[in-house]
Image: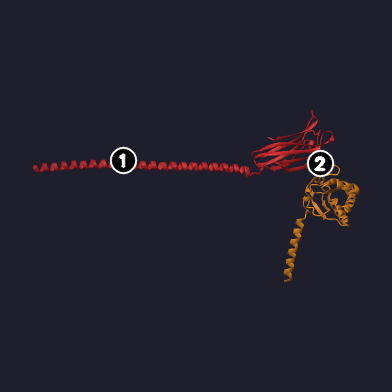
Chain colours: A red, B orange
């Protein structure tokens, strides 16, 4: 009887100790799992940070590439497309009663670029509505001074020489300027107008 | 060996002839120009396209020019009606001297004034006179440097040939 009681007691003690052990183990496991989870979270957060910083780097790089691309594009437009730096100068005449054109001299920034002598046939063509391209230049962007000197016979067949000055604001894209000779009836004098084609 | 030398000589002479031919203006488009003439009008070479044009570069200080000009004027008077034009280009700095000489010689062909020497540069005038013959298509066909008595016969033959084309 005593033996049976002893064995029962031993079993209960064993079971209880096993249960305690199991509880400890479970607690340990939970702690470990928590620790693991925490470390995983930290790693994830760290990697997320790294990813974010990498992403920022990529974005910065992308922006720099875009800026560089824009600068290159502008540079290309300014330098590599000569057609865009072109400026063409045209001569036209309206009526021409008070002025018989002989020649046109063009200076850009103080440098003579064209000196064109008109024959009687050419003047006739201008009076009939013809337009003559007297010069074509390649100019850098910015301001340029154009001086046009017209010589010929003025009112009462007198030698006539007149100059017209204009500042050309050369932007990107071709520019066309028309130097028009018109009659100012009221003053009975020729008039020289420089117009820009839109 | 002799054959080799002969071939080498032939090659060298061919190269020399080719380079000489290409250095001249013959066969090339005559550079266009416009100048003020003795009559006060401006004259442009390209307006004579379709005619045979002789361009004669001259100066008042050039003796052979004085000899040659009356002979050229005769050619001009004879062939003008059949499509021949003569443009005398004077290269003096002072056009008054040229006008005086024209009066003295009594020539009637148009004389143009190249005081800025732009046209003479275009035609690489390196002697006085220089006579250039331009065909109906505007191409330089003959260039004569200087003048010696008898050249007018050459001019006559060349003008007649070009007029027939």
Q: Residue at x 74, y 64 (%)?
A: B12
Query: Where residue A99 sits: x, y (%)?
Result: 81, 35
In this figure, which residue is indicated by the disc labeled 2?
A119
* Chain of the residue where label 2 is placed in the rendered structure: A
B140 or A140, which is in the foreground? A140
User: Is residue B81 shown to the viewer in this render?
Assistant: no
Few, some or many C-alpha atoms within 10 Å of disc 1 (few <14, some 14-19, many ≥20)?
A: few
Query: Where residue B56 sits: x, y (%)?
Result: 84, 51
> Which secondary structure, mark 2?
loop
Query: Where residue B128 sits: x, y (%)?
Result: 83, 54
Q: Is A165 displayed left or right of B158 in the figure?
A: left
* Chain of the residue where label 1 is placed in the rendered structure: A
Query: Where residue A40 sits: x, y (%)?
Result: 35, 42
Label for residue A34?
1
A150 or A33, which is in the foreground? A150
Label for residue B75?
none
Q: Residue at x 39, y 41 (%)?
A: A45
Disc 1 vs disc 2: which is toward the camera? 2
B50 or B118, which is in the foreground? B118
Q: Residue at x 81, y 53 (%)?
A: B141
């Amino acid at each position: 009887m005593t033996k049976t009681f002893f064995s029962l007691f031993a079993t209960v003690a064993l079971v209880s100790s096993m249960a305690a052990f199991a509880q400890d183990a479970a607690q340990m496991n939970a702690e470990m799992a928590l620790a693991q989870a925490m470390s995983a979270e930290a790693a994830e957060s760290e990697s997320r940070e790294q990813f974010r910083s990498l992403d920022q780097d990529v974005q910065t790089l992308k922006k720099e590439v875009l800026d560089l691309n824009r600068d290159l594009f502008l540079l290309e437009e300014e330098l590599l497309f000569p057609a865009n730096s072109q400026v063409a100068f045209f001569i036209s005449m309206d009526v021409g009663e008070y002025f018989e054109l002989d020649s046109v001299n063009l200076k850009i920034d103080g440098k003579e670029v064209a000196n064109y002598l008109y024959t009687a046939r050419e003047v006739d063509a201008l009076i009939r509505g013809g337009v003559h391209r007297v010069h074509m230049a390649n100019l850098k962007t910015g301001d340029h001074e154009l001086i046009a000197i017209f010589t010929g016979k003025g009112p009462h067949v007198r030698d006539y020489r007149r100059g017209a000055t204009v500042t050309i604001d050369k932007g990107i894209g071709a520019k066309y300027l028309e130097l028009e000779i018109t009659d100012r009836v009221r003053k009975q004098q020729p008039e020289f107008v420089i117009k820009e084609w839109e | 060996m002799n054959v080799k030398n002969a071939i080498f000589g032939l090659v060298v002479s061919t190269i020399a002839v080719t380079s000489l031919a290409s250095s001249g203006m013959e066969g090339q488009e005559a550079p266009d120009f416009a100048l003020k003439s003795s009559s006060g009008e401006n004259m442009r070479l390209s307006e004579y396209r379709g005619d045979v044009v002789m361009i004669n570069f001259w100066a008042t200080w050039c003796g052979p020019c004085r000899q040659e000009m009356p002979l050229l004027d005769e050619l001009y008077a004879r062939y003008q009606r059949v499509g021949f034009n003569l443009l005398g280009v004077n290269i003096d700095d002072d056009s008054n001297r040229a006008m005086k000489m024209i009066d003295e010689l009594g020539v009637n062909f148009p004389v143009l004034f190249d005081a800025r020497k732009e046209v003479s540069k275009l035609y690489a005038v390196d002697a006085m006179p220089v006579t250039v013959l331009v065909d109906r298509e505007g191409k330089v066909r003959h260039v004569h440097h200087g003048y010696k008595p008898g050249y007018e016969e050459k001019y006559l033959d060349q003008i007649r040939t070009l007029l027939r084309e």
